[in-house]
Amino acid sequence: MFESSTIKDIARALNLSTSTVSRALRDSYEISAGTKKLVMEYAQKVNYRPNPNALSLKERRSKSIGIVVSEVANHYFSQAINGIESIANSRGYTVIITQTHESVEREKTNVQHLASRSVDGLLISLSAETNDVSHLEQLHERGLPIVFFDRVPERINTYKIIADNAKGAYEATSHLIRSGHRKIAHISSSAHLSISIERLTGYTDALHHNGLNVRPEYIKNCPHGGMIQEEVETAVKELLSLNDKPDAIFVAGDRLTMGCMHVLKKLNMLNPTMIAIAGFSNSDVLDLFNPPITSVFQPAFDMGQLATEKLLELIEAKFPVTEFERDILHTRLFIR
Amino acid sequence: MFESSTIKDIARALNLSTSTVSRALRDSYEISAGTKKLVMEYAQKVNYRPNPNALSLKERRSKSIGIVVSEVANHYFSQAINGIESIANSRGYTVIITQTHESVEREKTNVQHLASRSVDGLLISLSAETNDVSHLEQLHERGLPIVFFDRVPERINTYKIIADNAKGAYEATSHLIRSGHRKIAHISSSAHLSISIERLTGYTDALHHNGLNVRPEYIKNCPHGGMIQEEVETAVKELLSLNDKPDAIFVAGDRLTMGCMHVLKKLNMLNPTMIAIAGFSNSDVLDLFNPPITSVFQPAFDMGQLATEKLLELIEAKFPVTEFERDILHTRLFIR
DNA sequence: TTAATTTACGCAAACGTTGCCGAAAACTAT
DNA sequence: ATAGTTTTCGGCAACGTTTGCGTAAATTAA
C-alpha cells in the first residue's frame, strides 16, 4: 500500500552498496565527500526516512515511551501529558498514551500491551483501583525503566514525581477554616492511593492545628476516584444526611470535585452559603463559578516534564541506576 | 536492558527449529499435537510475546494508527479518542495520539512523524490554522489510508465523519431566538474550517427563518479556535463595544465557549440577563452554571468509533477503495 | 620502483519473524 | 516388500538497517 523508499532503493539507484549508503547518510568518515553529497541529495529527493521498525529491531529499542493515566479528559493529566510530550518529542521519542479509566484490569492490559509493544520505558500514574502492583513489579524487575508520577506505589524502587499533596491539602483545609468553616468534610479517591493518604494527612493536620477534631463520619472515599458518579453521590448524600451536617467539603481530586459539584447542583445546594467546596483541581473552569471555588493546583506540566527527564535518564543510562530520588513539587492554592 | 524471550530461545530450549516453533504457536496444521502442546506450554511459561517490530518489518504494517487532534484537553476530542480506542484496541491496533494545539506547523510535523513511524493509517481532525492540506494530500496520494472527522477538508477524497453542524447550529440559534433574544452574535473558529462554515450556515438560516437579519459585525472569528485567549477576548470586547450590543452569543466550539465565558466573567457579565450564551460543547460542566448554559452536543464517541471502523476498512481492504461516504451524525441540543 | 599506508567501498551477519520449499520418517495401499 | 502418501519438521530467504571485517585502488614513504 504505502511504500517509502529504503536504503536499498537508494543503493540500487546510485549503484552503491547499502552499507555505503548507510554510512554516507550517517556522515561516516570512511565515505568520500563526493559520494556523501550524491547520497544525501538523492535521499533528500526521494524523501528517505529510515524505517523505525528495522531500527528498533536492530537497536533493540523503539524510541517510544508508554504513558498510563486514568483518562486524558482530566485537566491534571492532559497538562501532564503536554509536559511529557514536550520533553519526549524534543529528544526524539514517540509517546503512546493509554487510559485505565481507573480500572486495574485495564491498567494490567495496557501495561502488558505497552511492554509487548517494546516501549523503552513507562510513565505511570496508578489507577484508583490499583492496590497490588505486582504486575508492574515484574516488569520493573525484568529491567523495564519505569517512572511513577502523581499516584505512586510504595513498594517499587524507582523515581517518583509527586506534588506536595499534604501541604496542598493542608492549605486548602486551612483556607476553609479561615473562611469560618468548622465542620469540614473530606471526600477522596480510594483510600490506598498515595495521593489519598497524603491529602488525608494534610487535611487532618490542618484540623488539628486549628483545634478541630477529625470526625471519621466526615471522611468519605470513592474507590473509583469519581469515575462512577454513584459513588460520589452516595458520599455526598451520606454527609448531608448526618445529624451534624458539614458546612464545607475538601475534595481531593479533579474529577471528584466536578462530580461533587454535580451532586450538589442536583440537590440544589451548589452554593457556598449552603456548603463550601475546596478541592484539588487543575481546571480553570472553577474560575467561572459564582462565587468561584478555591482549588489546589498541581504543577502538572512540570511534573510531566520532570518525570520524562528522569525516565530518559534511566533509559539512556550506561549502567543500571540504583539510587532514586523522590521529587516533590509545590502546589499552588488558588483562592477564589 | 529489558529482554524478552524470542522464538529462537524457545527453539533452542526445545531443540526445535524456529519455523516449527513459529508454526506451533500459530496452531498450524502441519505440526503434531504433541509438539504444539510442548511449544505452547513452554511459551506460556516464559511469557513469550512476539516482537512487534519484527512483525511490522516482515508484514510491512505496524498495527498502529495515528490520531491527530487539536488537544486532548477538550471534551469533544477526549470522547472521540475513547471511541477510537474502543474499536482500535478490540481489533488489535495501537493508537498514537498527537496534538496540534491548533498549529498547522505542528500538524505537519506530527503527520510527518506518524508517517515515518509507519502507522497503517491516520485519523485526523484539522487544526484551526490549517487551510492548505497539501501535506496530507501527498501522503494520501502515496497510498496512506486517512479518515477525517469533525474538521474535514474539501479536497481530499476519502471517508469523512462529521456531525450535522448546520442543524446543530440552527437549533442552538433557534433556541436563543425562542428565549426572546433578537440580537444574536456568533463567535467561531477560523473561517475556513468546515465546521465553521457549516455552523455559520445553521446560524444564518435560523436568523433568516425567524425574520432576523444577519449582521456582519455580529460575526467574529478566532483563527486559533480559542487556543489564544486574546483572540477570544478581542472578539467579545468588540461585540460589547458595538452601539447596538448583542444580547446573546452563539459560540461554535468547546474551547471557544469556555474562553468566551472567561472573558464575560472578567467583565462581570457572565449572566444571561446581561448576555445569553449557547454553544457547541461536549462538556457536562455546563450543567453546573446557574442558570445553566444551553449547548449542542456532538456524538463524539460514536464519531470516533465510526471513523475508526472506516479507517480499518481502508487499511484492511484487499483492493483500493475509491467510493467514499460522508457520514453525518446527529447532534443533540441540551436545553438548560 | 617497491613497499607501506591510507582511502573508499563491498560483503555478510544480525535483529525476530514468517513462509516457501524440500525432505526424513511414518503410514497406507497394493 | 515395494511404491506411493501423508505427516511432521528443518533450511533458507526475506523484511530494512547497522557494523565488523576484508580488500582493491589510491596515495605516500623509502
Image (spheres, coloured by chain):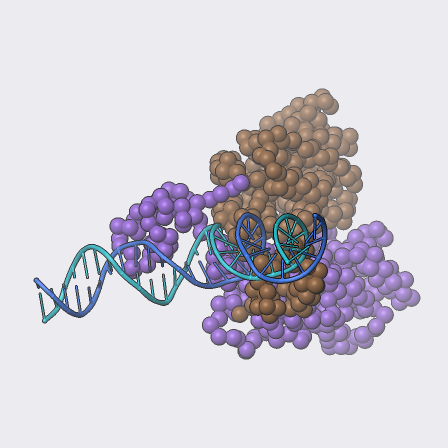
Chain colours: A purple, B brown, C blue, D cyan
Q: Residue at horizontal 66%, vertical 35%?
A: B162
Q: How many marks?
A: 0
Q: In the visual, does A9 lie left or right of A2? A: left
Q: Residue at horizontal 40%, vertical 42%?
A: A46
Q: Height in image: A223 above or below B129? A: below
Q: In the visual, does C13 lie left or right of A298? A: left
Q: Position of residue A27 (x, y in %)?
A: 33, 56
Q: Residue at horizontal 29%, vertical 59%?
A: A30
Q: Quadrant of residue B195?
A: top right
Q: Position of residue B25 (x, y in %)?
A: 65, 58
Q: Position of residue B112 (x, y in %)?
A: 49, 46
Q: Quarter of the image containing the C terminus of chain B?
A: top right
Q: Is residue A236 visible?
A: no
**Farthest right residue in view:** A243
Q: Nearer the viewer, residue B14 or A182?
A: B14
Q: Nearer the viewer, residue A115 or C6?
A: C6
Q: Quadrant of residue A158?
A: bottom right
Q: Position of residue B288 (x, y in %)?
A: 76, 49
Q: Residue at horizontal 26%, vertical 54%?
A: A32
Q: Height in image: A61 above or below D16? A: below
Q: Height in image: B154 above or below A141? A: above
Q: Is residue A142 visible?
A: yes
